[in-house]
Image: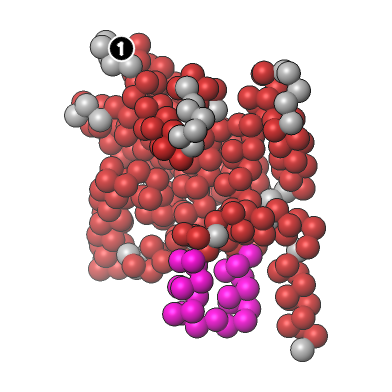
């Protein structure tokens, strides 16, 4: 083994170790490391590491983290596999999100059945119920109500993991000195733009989910879609703002202050920007302006 190959293997080892540690400690915040790991390591290595990690977490009694991390690992791994095969990023993203949600549901069902004395669904819903009741103390929400929106919440979390993975992938590769070979079908995150069909499905879901049509099943499905849509529009808005800061050459300090303010104080504004961008196409307008000047 030559020096270059040895250094590459060493860097991959540290990336894999960091991916595991950050994922266990911070759940979906480990996604950028997992994204870099999934595109850099051999598939056999990536999937073996994921399976061993999930098994280890279950053995240690960390059942819920095993579900979270397993779903994120599945989502990013499936996306990477499809990306390498030339599948369009939109199709790859949808398939990988569905795979992540299904894998979480299957693992949660199996663990609930075989781990006697543990109500994992209740354990999963409790922190969500507590957080929502603190946010809306005048209108307490029952756990059964939250359970009906769990697929949307979980899919939104996986979407966030994918978004973080794309945004920070380049930085992670630079930190670990890993060469990334781009594929033609891959997503350039500054070009991220939700498909037209997604926009209209989201708008119809908001209409049917929020106005009340006395069809509980339709309303629940619609609101699950709305939950995912909110996160999707948030990331599109984030991409638009990032594009603007680069186009107008905003300094690092000003850019940092802007994003801190937007993330902590004006997140709804990013969602609105992401939605309006479908019609306004801010990035195209800026490109035309720069080209004209």
The reply, left or right, for residue 8 in relation to residue 78 is left
Region in magenta: 240-261
Residue drawn at x 71%, y 69% as measured from the top left: 283
Q: Is residue 70 at least partly visible in the picture?
A: no
Residue drawn at x 46%, y 73% as measured from the top left: 257
Residue drawn at x 30%, y 12% as measured from the top left: 114
Single out the residue that lies furthest toward the left: 60
| Relative height, residue 41 to residue 117 (above, below) | below
| Relative height, residue 123 to residue 169 (above, below) | above
Q: Residue 128, position in %: x, y?
A: 42, 33
Classified by dominant secondary structure, the portion drawn in magenta counts as helix
> Residue under circle 1?
114
Which colour assignment does the render follow? secondary structure
At mark 1, the secondary structure is helix
- Quadrant of the snapshot with the C terminus: bottom right
Single out the residue that lies furthest toward the bottom: 293
In the foreground, 202 or 184: 202
């Amino acid at each position: 083994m030559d020096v270059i190959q040895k250094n590459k293997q060493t860097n991959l080892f540290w990336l894999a170790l960091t991916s595991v540690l950050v994922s266990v400690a911070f759940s979906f915040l480990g996604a950028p490391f997992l994204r870099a790991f999934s595109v850099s390591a051999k598939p056999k290595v990536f999937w073996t590491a994921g399976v061993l990690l999930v098994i280890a977490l279950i053995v240690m009694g960390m059942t819920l983290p095993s579900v979270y991390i397993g779903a994120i690992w599945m989502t990013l791994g499936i996306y990477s596999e499809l990306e390498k095969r030339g599948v369009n990023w939109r199709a790859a993203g949808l398939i990988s999100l569905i795979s992540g949600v299904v894998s979480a549901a299957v693992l949660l069902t199996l663990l609930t059945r075989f781990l006697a004395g543990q109500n994992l669904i209740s354990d999963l819903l409790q922190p969500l119920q507590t957080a929502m009741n603190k946010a809306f103390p005048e209108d307490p929400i029952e756990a059964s109500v939250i359970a009906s929106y769990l697929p949307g919440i979980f899919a939104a979390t996986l979407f966030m993991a994918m978004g973080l993975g794309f945004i920070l992938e380049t930085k992670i590769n630079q930190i670990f000195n890993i060469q990334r070979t781009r594929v033609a079908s891959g997503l350039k995150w500054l070009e991220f733009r939700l498909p037209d069909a997604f926009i209209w499905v989201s708008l119809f879901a908001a209409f049917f989910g929020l106005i009340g049509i006395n069809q509980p099943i339709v309303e629940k499905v619609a609101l699950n879609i709305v939950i995912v849509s909110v996160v999707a529009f948030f990331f599109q808005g984030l991409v638009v703002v990032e594009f603007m800061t680069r186009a107008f050459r905003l300094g690092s300090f000003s850019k940092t202050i802007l994003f801190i303010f937007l993330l902590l104080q004006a997140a709804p504004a990013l969602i609105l920007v992401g939605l309006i961008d479908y019609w306004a196409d801010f990035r195209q307008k800026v490109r035309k302006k720069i080209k004209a000047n």
